[in-house]
Amino acid sequence: MRALYTIIGCVFLLSADQNQVPPRKIIDVHFHAWLFADYGKTPAPNPVTGKAPKCKNDEDVIAIMLATLKENNVVKAIACGSLTTIKGFKMADPNRIIPSLNYPDKQNNPLPDTALFIRYFQDGKFDVFGELGLQYEGKTLADPELEPYIGICERMGIPVALHTGMSFPNTPYTCCPKFRTSLGNPQLIEEVLIKHPKLKIQLMHLGFPWLQETKAIMNVYPQVYSDIAAIDWLRPVPEFYNYLKSFMESGFGKRIMYGSDQMAWEDAIPLSIKNIEEAPFLTEEQKQDIFYNNAARFYNIK
């Protein structure tokens, strides 16, 4: 009898394991490869949860951030930073991290000249050009300084990730006196798209709050995808849901990608994932597209 109970128990456990849904694979297309000094003297608490970052040094930053990705089944992360910081993250987890060249970066490094830019890409030092935070410098993607690099990206198939939309309160009074909200309008990239029709562009933050302008660009230019980073956890959830739902209803569900905009707060990733999982208007297929399929297509991730 004891043997019979053992067999029944094993069958039950086996059936339970077979019925378990495997964890969802996620690609984070907007992740920051920063080091401790990039947070400032005292890292501020998460503005939503109030939790302070646990990191105390560079080793902590890399270990904790990579552990957070792993715990949330983020199998790939487009990690933007300087050549130095993205190298550190890539070395620590080469299969998960896709390096992306941030400009301007936290160290205010100049752009490498075009010959070095090409060589760095060919050598695998970066795979993506961005985040391009040009708005913080009072510039747009149409700035003449960027034109040679945009041409290279189009010819070599390098995706460009561009900051669009807004920023934190008081941005012009603190870090970035040239920042203007008007420069975050996605329609400002249109002439670049006309000149470079094969250029792949990722609009960061889904152009928030430029709803109709972002839709206009995405409607006319199918090579443009968008991420929902930051607005998926920093904005009030009802506002985020209304904004995202409008894009889904307009038929852009195959070109919207998950991003965390993870900077210093490890709880931003699970919070942003939760908000998407709980969106009542998204189907299971749409969630899987946002979390993985769309980014895999855009970035040719196998």
Image (cartoon, rainbow, N blue to C red):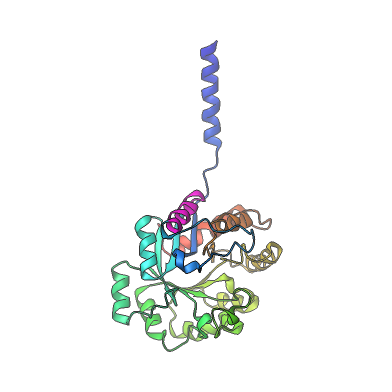
Question: How many numbered marks, from 0 up?
Answer: 0
Quadrant of the rendered structure where residue 195 is? bottom left
Q: Is residue 94 visible?
A: no
Residue located 66% across and 65% down the image: 240
Q: Quadrant of the C terminus?
A: bottom left
Question: Does the magenta-highlighted stretch encompass residue 66?
Answer: yes
Question: What segment carries the magenta color?
Answer: 60-74
Quick one: which residue is furthest to the right in this view? 238
Q: Quadrant of the N terminus?
A: top right
Majority SS type along the magenta span: helix
Q: Is residue 29 visible?
A: yes
Nearer to the camera, 201 or 219 = 201
Question: Does the magenta-highlighted stretch encompass residue 65?
Answer: yes
Give x and y (percent) for residue 114.
Answer: 32, 81
Residue located 32% across and 82% down the image: 113
Residue located 52% across and 75% down the image: 163
Nearer to the camera, 127 or 297 = 127
Give x and y (percent) for residue 211.
Answer: 64, 75
Residue located 52% across and 49% down the image: 24
Residue 265, above or below 206: above
Residue 194, above or below 3: below
Residue 184, above or below 62: below
Quick one: which residue is furthest to the front in this view? 41
Residue 231, above or below 189: above
Quick one: which residue is furthest to the bottom in this view? 144
Give x and y (percent) for residue 15.
Answer: 54, 30
Quadrant of the rendered structure where residue 248 is? bottom right
